[in-house]
Amino acid sequence: MTKKLFGTDGIRGIANQHPMTAEVALSVGRAIAYLSKREGHSPRIIIGKDTRLSGDMFESSLISGICSMGVNAISVGVIPTPGIAFLTSNMRADAGIVISASHNPMQDNGIKIFKSDGFKLSDEKENQIEELVFANNMHKLHPAPKELGKLSRMDDAAGRYVDFVKQTFPQDLNPEGIKVVLDCSNGATYRVAPAVFTELGVEITTLFNQPDGRNINLNCGSQHPEALAAEVLRQKADVGFAFDGDGDRVIAVDEKGNVLTGDQALALCSAILKKEGKLTNNLVVRTVMSNLGLSVAFQKLGIDSVFADVGDRYVLKEMLAKGAIIGGEDSGHIIFLQHHTTGDGLITALQVLAAMKKEGKSLSELAGIMTVFPQMLINLDVKKKPKIESVPEIMAAIKQVEEKLGDKGRVLVRYSGTQNMCRVMVEGPTKKETETYCRQIADVVKKMLA
């Protein structure tokens, strides 16, 4: 069936507008609970959220749906998305649900679901949920009143997750003496990130850790690291880390105030793994959005790589299929399979910190392993999403730019999987050319689709 709810990363949309309504959340909760039931087994489903104002509404709806099907719900409150993945597996729960729209603005929200093993749902399982939701007959499957599910609250969830993350930092390294600035994006990491670094003995300064339900990702976090970069310089810190709203990605800032790309973090962490003989199959998975500079860096390092579609679930799929232990996106979403089942901004930050200690080098020195090619990305709001190749005017604009760039650059035009948006990305030999060509294509896209 054609998907009507799930995008590339769960269900996402504007709160109180389809599909992100309380009614849909209730039905999704019922569907997940129904699929968790089996003879002689008492299912449990864990639920967590980020700091968005609408999180309470969706949490209540999901819990109602779950309990109405005779399944128990465990609420853990505000916690990063990878924290739910960990807890689901660690507690042998039947599923884990995260209420979050990641790096999106506060008016958006979303529902992400993890299987009992801590991995995200397959397309097939998402389709099953959709079929149940749209069949609209689950009320016929309700159990008797005495068989309803119960809600419990787990008070030590954050502490468990903090301990788990700390264990991913090498035991033989001492990070004491390093000065770190943390930007918590007024999101799900606002308590756990400072706890992780403080308990490791790191000297920290924390920004944007006062969520009010409305300020998540607002001019801060991984999408807006400018304030972090300024604070790193002011504090004369060694490194800064900016997390997104749900804590599954991170962007690093070096001691000179330079903002690193996710590709640079992926390159330096991959290089360390190769040097230590731990880069399984000498392979890294990256996406079609990866910078050309990453290809050059891997070639110099003698590291093989394969491309995946954009989205961490597709990166993970390729990692599992090809036997890679590291993969990631330029957005700062990196998966370390030797540590976790999903991308985790805190774990990534600790691996970058570990690389600095292992090599005895500043982050700016380590980042020099990759030269970032000039790149421009323009995000355009669109009213419709026809296949790009079906719009002759857009295809003609792309072809014209590709002919001018030749082998000195590339063009990628794709829709966002989580928003009504088209992304136009161009890489080229110079900043001026890159910007000119990108705007040239974006103007056509806007004319045809906006």
Image (cartoon, rainbow, N blue to C red):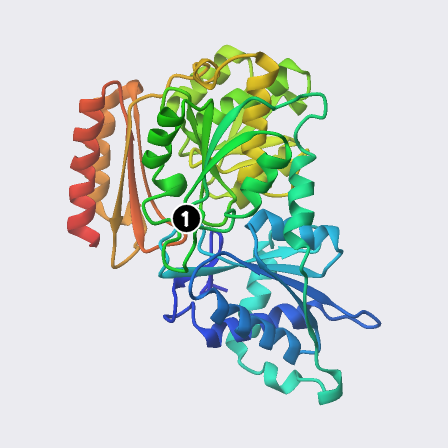
Residue 314, image x, y percentages: 53, 43
Horizontally, residue 387 falls left or right of residue 356, namely left
Amino acid tagged 1: His
State whether residue 393 appears in this view: no
Q: Position of residue 129 (x, y in %)?
A: 57, 67
Residue sitting farthest toward the bottom: 145
Quarter residue 431 falls in: top left
Q: Is residue 151 above or below residue 100?
A: below
Q: What residue is shown with label 1?
A: 103
In the rendered image, residue 374, in percent from the top left (x then y), is placed at 29, 23
Q: Residues within 10 Å of mark 1 (few under 14, many from 20)?
A: many
- Is 178 or 361 nearer to us in this picture? 178
Residue 165 lies, with reference to residue 79, above or below; the image says above
What percent of the width, then of the height, locates residue 141? 66, 83
- Residue found 32% across the figure and 51% down from its top: 387
Q: The C terminus lies in which quarter of the figure?
A: bottom left
At x 42% / y 64%, what residue is drawn?
53
Report the residue at 40% width, 42% height from top: 221
Q: Is residue 142 left or right of residue 218?
A: right
Res. 230 in view:
yes
Q: Is residue 66 above or below residue 185?
A: below
Q: How many marks?
A: 1
**As rendered, which of 342 and 84 lies closer to the eye?**
84
Q: Secondary structure at mark 1?
A: loop
Residue farthest to the right? 40
Which picture quadrant has residue 423?
top left
